[in-house]
């Protein structure tokens, strides 16, 4: 099963594409990373242009990998309204792009991802990154942070979801 994890954002959207043999199995041999990275936009672009770039980038990823599941980080709390609105818009584009390709979408909050992947909902970002590095046998922690977060989001589905 091919799963794509998405960490939504307007400036930077992280993605991680993994393949898993079984769902709800934590064995390292059960999953591997196919690709990870980011879709970036410029603050010099209009909001609509940034959302178009996000749509096009995600559309290319969905065509390339043909995932069976898209997992996105759920937005549940924001300290700053100025960031909440653009991230919500980006998430809307992500949901629409997935729907157009008929890819089912699942959501996990950051707390759930930390709990499922690192074993504690209070885990620091660095702890989750180290766990991702270890689980995928990477030489280094995936960069940027948005891509590492997206891999963790995809793994949360593999570890948690009941088949």
Image (tube, rainbow, N blue to C red):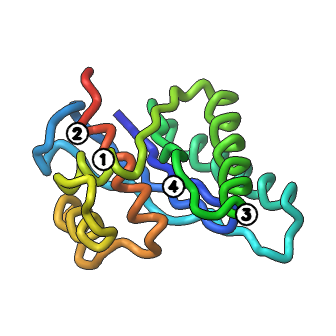
> Which corner quadrant holds the N terminus?
top left
Assess disc 4: are there few (<14), some (14-19) or many (≥20) residues with their C-alpha within 10 Å of its C-alpha.
Answer: many
Q: Nearer the viewer, residue 79 or 45?
A: 79
Q: CB of mark 3 within 8 Å of CB of mark 4?
A: no
Nearer the viewer's eye, disc 3 or disc 1? 3
Nearer the viewer's eye, disc 3 or disc 4? 3
- Mark 3 element type: helix
Q: Which residue is mark 2?
A: 159
Q: Which residue is mark 4?
A: 7
Is residue 42 depicted above or below 99 in this figure? below
Mark positioned earlier in the residue sequence (3 or 1): 3
Q: Residue furthest front?
A: 79
Q: Which residue is mark 3?
A: 82
Nearer the viewer's eye, disc 3 or disc 2? 3
Q: Residue at x 50, y 56 (%)?
A: 15
Q: CA distance from mark 4 to mark 1?
A: 13 Å
Q: CA distance from mark 2 to mark 4?
A: 18 Å
Q: Position of residue 144 (x, y in %)?
A: 46, 74
- Mark 2 element type: helix
Q: CA distance from mark 3 to mark 1?
A: 29 Å
Q: Position of residue 94 (x, y in %)?
A: 64, 43
Numbered mark located on residue 155 in the image = 1
Mark positioned earlier in the residue sequence (3 or 2): 3
Count of number-bearing discs: 4
């Amino acid at each position: 099963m091919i799963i794509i994890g998405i960490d939504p954002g307007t400036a930077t959207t992280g993605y991680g594409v993994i393949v898993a043999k079984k769902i709800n199995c934590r064995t390292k041999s059960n999953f591997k990373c196919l690709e990870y990275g980011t879709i970036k936009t410029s603050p010099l672009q209009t909001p609509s242009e940034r959302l178009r770039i996000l749509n096009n980038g995600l559309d290319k990823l969905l065509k390339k990998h043909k995932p069976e599941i898209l997992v996105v980080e759920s937005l549940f709390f924001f300290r700053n309204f100025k960031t909440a609105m653009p991230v919500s818009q980006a998430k809307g584009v992500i949901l629409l792009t997935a729907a157009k390709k008929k890819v089912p979408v699942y959501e996990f909050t950051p707390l759930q991802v930390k709990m499922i992947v690192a074993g504690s909902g209070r885990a620091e970002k660095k702890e989750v990154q180290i766990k991702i590095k270890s689980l995928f046998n990477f030489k280094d922690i995936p960069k940027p942070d948005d891509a590492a977060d997206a891999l963790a989001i995809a793994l949360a589905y593999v570890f948690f979801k009941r088949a």
